[in-house]
Amino acid sequence: MFLKKQNHNKDGKDHVYWSLVENNRTGHTTKHRLLCYLGELNSSQEKRWRKTINVFNDEGEEEQLHLFPSDNVPEEGSENIVKIDLKTVGLERCREFGAIYAALELWKRLGLDKFWERKLDNKKEGAGREPDIEWSKVAAILAINRLCDPGSELSIEEQWFRSTALDDLLNVEEKKINSDRLYDCLDQIIRHKEELEKHLKEQYGELFNVKYEIILYDITSTYFEGENKRNDQAKRGYSRDHRPDCKQICIALVVSEEGFPFSYEIFDGNRVDVTTLEEFMEGIEKKYGKAQRIWVFDRGIVSEENLEILRKKESKYLTGTRRSELKKYEKELLDKDWKEVQKGVEVKLISAGTGKETYVLCRAIKRKAKEEAMRKTASEKLEKYLEKLSERIKRGKLKDAIKIERKIGAITGKYASISDLYEIEYKEGKLEWKINQEKIEWCKAREGAYLLRTNLTEEDPEILWKKYIQLTEAEAAFRVLKSELAIRPIWHQKTERVHAHIMVAFMGYALWVTLKHILKNAGVAYSPGRALNTLKRIHSGDIIMQTVDKVERYRLRLRRVFRPDAEERLLLNALKIQIPEKLSIDLKLKCGTDL
């Protein structure tokens, strides 16, 4: 099989065309049989076709096989010519490659390969034995799985790892990855949580020039499956996942204003949000020292005690306030001197009276429309139940005044958010209700409005609002952890394993947010999820073929990576990733030997 060159002159210009042909002996003559017409090739394309193929025979000796151009064909019988039976050509061992390769590149850019090599490798296994696989590679497998296709340790062993090319990329045999080894790795990595956080903080600074002058603090919860009797932190509490039936833990997280994770802590599942701030701040100061940081958090963390703690530490803060605080500023809310900071959002600076703080009144049209729709829906349902109760009373099916009062209490309790707008009275066998006009007018006025407070000296309400709205980055981090990275539900039972599970998710999110900002900086309008799904289309596989030598026939296995299409190349270029054309395993075995 070789390249055949044909010269052709067209319009006074010489053209060279190429074909892939093979010698076909008929009787006493040899003719060229056309396998593939290649057309005109540029220098790089021709070079690829001429490229040497390195293979190994069954004795482990390396040989070189060439595709020769037709003007330099070796004599018949030369050992360097490969003749292939085209009927035997096939494709085996397809593995997911593109997303896995990109994730591994991100892992290396964050320096996590070197970090875990320093922390974990060359450590003794049980009974003083050296591990037969580096722990740093197992850590990479756990984090890449969490990013690309999150699943349990058992699913990694039974399904996921063998479906990817990680065995080739990490030089890890498939049989060495099992759930016990993955669990052991969890026990190893959790000891280095603080060092990991510091390492990632430094890497974000180097890669993206991230500064932690403003840090966004938020809390979420994630629930367990099972009783979790061996985990003291597993408690029942306020569930943001709407699973009050399950035990849970609370996770506090701080991120930069761009969304890069700074640090996290795990609290008991019944811990109240407002009680976590002081403990978390002490942990941050212990790890990173005292600094002039601006703490941004929502109204769930606010208390006068917390704000006083921040003032004593001479820390700056910008926070939301409870809805009840709006009543103090009813006049300002009804005035019309608002400043539009973006379409549908208005703000104004108001005086707090103390001189130590600045208050910013905000109003969003979309939020107003949403709250108005929720109020109307709740009102309609409340009135519907009151009408049903009134009908029962009129028909004499319900006469006991105590039972009637209980029914009224149950209805108003179900719709507590709007029940205070109604005046409900049962008197002389009749149930009557009406809306309190003063309360409904105030309710309409405050819909869509919220109040910020800060000890910053900034006097432009637009700047303060924009800093506060960055809190959505922390909320987005929790959404990614819960959805794309599947941190919930937690199946682990031991406290240490639970902490390690969250640490793996933290590393997965580090890869996710790195991918997000590389795409953003490259001007590619892809979310990390869409980018990974696109790259998952790139696979690796083994090309199988058999020689047609008369004396000794061989079977060749060439491990190659599928060529990316235009969309995949766009993404790879944006990520500055160049995937290899081939993997290291090329084999030449005698026919009859298992491949």
Image: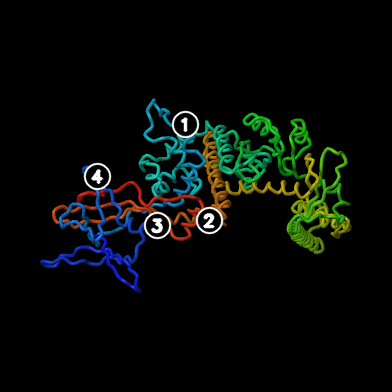
Label drawn at residue 118: 1
Label drawn at residue 563: 3
Q: Which residue is mark 4?
A: 62
Helix, strand or loop at mark 3: loop
Residue 403 visible within the image: no
Query: Which mark is in front, 4 or 2?
Result: 4
| Quarter of the picture holding the N terminus | bottom left
Q: Which residue is mark 2?
A: 530
Q: Tell me the kind of residue under disc 1.
A: Arg
| Residue at the front extreme, as displayed | 12
Q: Residue at x 25, y 57 (%)?
A: 68
Dots 3, 2 in contact, CB < 8 A: no
| Upstream in sequence: badge 4 or badge 1 | 4
Give the vertical position of 72 relative to 251 (above or below): below
Colouring rule applied to residues: rainbow
| Residue at the bottom extreme, as displayed | 11
Mark 2 → mark 1, Cα distance in angstroms? 33 Å
Q: Tell me the kind of residue under disc 4.
A: Glu
Horizontal side, residue 385 vs residue 52: left or right: right
